[in-house]
């Protein structure tokens, strides 16, 4: 009995440590935004500057974009996903929780898949310039929120973990996902900061950026005690528990949730908030499927995935065999 207060205190400290990074990242992002020097002002004071041989302003702008994208999506997305998971669980409806897990297993990746083909159609007028904040509230925050909600539901409903442990693990997932999205956007939408050309004198900036990001990732993994072995063990528990609850899952409840979301979408379209309706999207989808180009693209994508899996699996077989035979390296 005497150990219970100590365990509770330890869980509280772990939760506070887990929340420290998203809170710091949010304040740091806001600081970068509201202390931004005037563009083109040669007398503006810059806190951090890099030598031109490292990339100069390109490197500074690139890392600044990553910091802002990460800071503005990690904590808000985690908070929204946590509250959504909490609201589902407090209903104490097992079928609703199971159906939500079934929907979110695939649905959590929807922001990555449908962004360019649907989000711009829903929110942006043709030819309108979309800035950084549109990416944050239509891609970064929803992707983090859906992932956190899914993880909390799995931890609480499937693994029966306590709230502190569930939230601590989910915050770690929010940080990793927000960093992943920030990197993807930085290397696609704002690629000009990282562009590599032959005989480029500033190629060293990519090594500097990689070192900075690797150091930050090490800090994230240290704070959340995460790693390949820990993540593998956690997802194994979730997978086994998910298989065991198949009888509790309701396909009809999951279908009803999807239908409800579609109806809400249609209502918002009728009210003028969304420019595209589910019917128009369905018509376009039928047109695409009836053509041959999309099937060729799907075949190329599947081939790339298969080659990637085979290549990665081969490395996984070779590296442990060749390196882990040494006791020092294995430790």
Image (cartoon, helix red, strand yellow):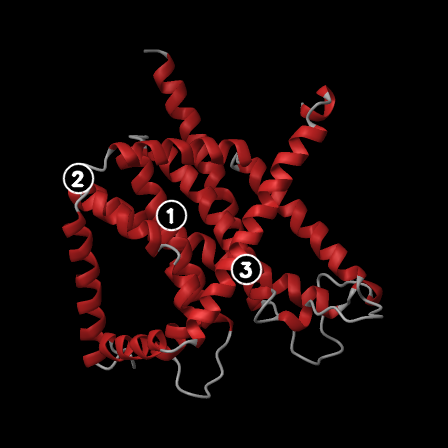
Residue 129 horizontal side relative to residue 78, left or right: right
CA–CA distance between discs 2 and 1? 19 Å
> Circle 3 is placed at which residue position?
182
- Residue at disc 3, secondary structure: helix
Callout 2: 10 Å neighbours few (<14), some, many (20+)? some
CA–CA distance between discs 2 and 3? 35 Å
The circle drawn on residue 94 is 2
Callout 3: 10 Å neighbours few (<14), some, many (20+)? many
The circle drawn on residue 224 is none
Relative depth, front residue between 280 and 4: 280
In the rendered image, residue 45, in percent from the top left (x then y), is placed at: 72, 69
Q: Nearer the viewer, mark 2 or mark 3?
A: 2
- Res 284 quadrant in image: bottom left
Label whose residue precedes the other's in the sequence (3 or 1):
1
Label whose residue precedes the other's in the sequence (2 or 1):
2
- Say whether marks 2 and 3 touch (CB < 8 Å): no
């Amino acid at each position: 009995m005497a150990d219970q207060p100590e365990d509770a205190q330890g869980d509280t400290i772990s939760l506070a440590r887990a929340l420290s990074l998203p809170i710091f990242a949010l304040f740091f992002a806001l600081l970068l935004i509201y202390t931004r020097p005037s563009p083109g002002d040669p007398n503006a004071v810059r806190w951090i500057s890099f030598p031109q041989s490292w990339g100069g302003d390109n490197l500074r702008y690139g890392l600044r974009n990553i910091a802002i994208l990460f800071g503005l999506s990690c904590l808000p997305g985690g908070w929204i996903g946590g509250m959504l998971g909490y609201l589902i669980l407090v209903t104490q409806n097992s079928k609703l929780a199971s159906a939500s897990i079934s929907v979110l297993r695939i649905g959590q990746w929807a922001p990555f898949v449908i962004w360019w083909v649907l989000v711009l159609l829903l929110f942006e007028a043709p030819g309108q310039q979309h800035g950084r904040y549109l990416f944050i509230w239509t891609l970064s925050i929803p992707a983090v929120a859906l992932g956190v909600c899914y993880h909390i539901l799995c931890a609480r409903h499937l693994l029966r973990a306590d709230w502190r442990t569930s939230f601590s693990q989910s915050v770690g997932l929010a940080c990793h996902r927000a960093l992943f999205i920030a990197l993807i956007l930085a290397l696609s939408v704002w690629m000009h900061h990282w562009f590599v050309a032959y005989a480029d004198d500033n190629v060293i900036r990519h090594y500097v950026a990689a070192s900075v990001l690797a150091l930050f990732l090490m800090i994230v993994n240290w704070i959340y005690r995460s790693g390949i072995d820990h993540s593998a063990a956690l997802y194994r528990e979730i997978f086994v528990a998910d298989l065991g609850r198949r009888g509790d899952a309701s396909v009809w409840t999951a279908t009803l949730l999807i239908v409800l979301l579609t109806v809400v979408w249609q209502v918002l379209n009728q009210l003028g908030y969304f420019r595209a309706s589910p019917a128009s999207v369905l018509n376009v989808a039928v047109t695409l499927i009836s053509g041959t180009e999309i099937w060729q693209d799907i075949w190329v994508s599947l081939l790339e995935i298969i080659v990637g899996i085979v290549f990665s699996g081969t490395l996984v077989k070779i590296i442990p065999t060749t390196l882990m035979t040494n006791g020092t390296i294995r430790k």
